[in-house]
Each structure stands twice: as structure tokens, then as C-alpha cells.
Image (spheres, rainbow, N blue to C red):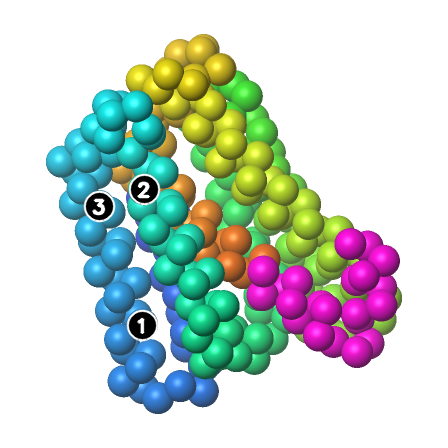
Amino acid sequence: MLDMIGAIAGTAIYAVLVGVLVGPSRESVPTKLVACAAAAAWGVMIVAIAALGGFGPGAAGPVPAPVFPFAACLALLFGSWFFIPRFRDALLALPLSALVALNAGRVGGVLFLLLAAEGRLSAPFAPSAGGGDIITGLLAIPLAILAWRGADRLATPLALWNAFGILDLIVAISLGLLSAPGTPFRIFTAEPGTLAMTTLPWILVPSILVPIYLLVHLTIAMKLRASPRLSTAAAVAG
């Protein structure tokens, strides 16, 4: 049952992320369709590999297999940001409120806690990743509303929240690697570690959702810095 909920939630969050990041863009309809098709193809590929056990312990030798799709997706997204101005400009043109609101989906981190309660994820990964995502997602809702209303003195709380959201993802990635079964550098040895994150539907988190959320956080940070009204306060918070 929990896997079904995770599959629905993960797919829905992915669809919303792609829809919000691509849909309002000023790019042509064919360009948007190509972007959506590429996102769909990436998702299908990840699901197919996971269904064949391609992300399980030992599948990539001593390195946790989910590292490879995570790194590939991150390199593609951040490479596009830094080397394709049209890509970067399209993201920066999105409303700040929409970018912040996208993080509301991270309340789904409660599923990590439920997996831990079922004995399918271990500490410290599950409570840290789950709790951090829940906090980030819950705070995103009022902050997005305030940003939409154009509230003053919002830069400092936004910058602090954005930094927390980034740190949460970095810590989750680090703890996930250090808890991965079948690796020589595993530090947190409580079973089952992060084994669930190598299977469907949970593999969608490191291979798709985390890289996109990191890109969203980068975009928010750049928008805060670029805004004449917000840059001073954001710099103080940073």
C-alpha cells in the first residue's frame, strides 16, 4: 500500500515540477513538447532499470547505483543552467511564488518516516531526510503566499528557508550514501539502511526529484540576488 502511495505521489510531484518549470515558458510549443518528452523518457528509463534490479546493491560494484542517475540528471540540469542562457532565462522568468510553492510537495517526506516505521528505512537517513523535507514543504506554503502577495521584508526568511532546503537535500544525499548496503564506505550499518531507495517507486527520489529540487533552489537564490528590492536582505541572510 505504501509503495502504491509513493508511486502516485512521486509521479504527481514529477509531473507538477515539469509542468510548472516548462509550461509557462515563453519558448515555442515544439520546444516545450521536446522538454516534456525528454522528462518522460528519463522517467521511463529509470523505472525500467529499477524494475530489472539495476539499482540494487552491487549492481554498480562498490558504488551505490543510484549515484549514477542522480549525477547524470544533476549534470544535465546544472549544465543547461550554466551553458544554455535560454534555459536559465526561462527559469528566472518564473514567478518566485511558483518556485517556492513547488517545494510544498516535499511534505511527502512523511513517507520516509512511514517506511522507517515499517522497518524498510533506517536512521539517521529516514528521520533526517523525512523531517527536513516536511519542514521545508510546510514552510513553503506560507512563504509562497507571501511572495505572491508581494510582502515586504520577505528576503531574509526566504533566503534562510532556501538555504535550509538546500542543506536538507545535501544532508539526505550524504546520509543516503553512507547508509547504502553493499558499499565499503558504509558508516551507518543499521539494517536495512537505504535499500528501499534502490527500488520502485522510491528510486524516483534520488534519480529525479532531488536534482530538480536543487535546480529550483538555485533559481530561487538567483532571483533573490537579482531583485533590487530583495538583494540586500538576502545577502545579509546568506
Instruction: Using a 10 Å C-alpha cutoff, classify the residue at mark 2 as few (fewer than 14 neighbours), some (14 to 19) or many (20 or more).
Output: some
- The three-letter code of the residue at mark 2 reads Phe
Disc 3 element: helix
Q: Amino acid at mark 1?
A: Ala
Task: Where is residue 226? Give x, y as percent.
Answer: 71, 74
> Residue at position x 65%, y 67% from top?
222
* Image side of residue 149 versus residue 15, left or right: right
Residue 19: x, y in percent? Answer: 40, 69
The mark closer to the camera, 2 or 1, is: 2
What is the three-letter code of the residue carrying label 3? Val
In the rendered view, would you say 98 is above or below 203? below
Residue 115's place in the image compared with 201, above or below, is: above
Question: Which stretch appears magenta?
Answer: 218-238
Q: Earlier in the sequence, mark 2 or mark 1?
A: 1
| Closer to the camera in the image, 73 or 27 | 73
Would you say residue 141 is visible in this rendering?
Answer: yes
Whichever of labels 3 and 1 marks the residue nearer the N terminus, that label is: 1
Residue drawn at x 43%, y 75% is: 84
Q: Are marks 3 and 2 in contact (CB under 8 Å)?
A: no
Tell me the tag on residue 68.
2
Residue on which the image places disc 1: 35
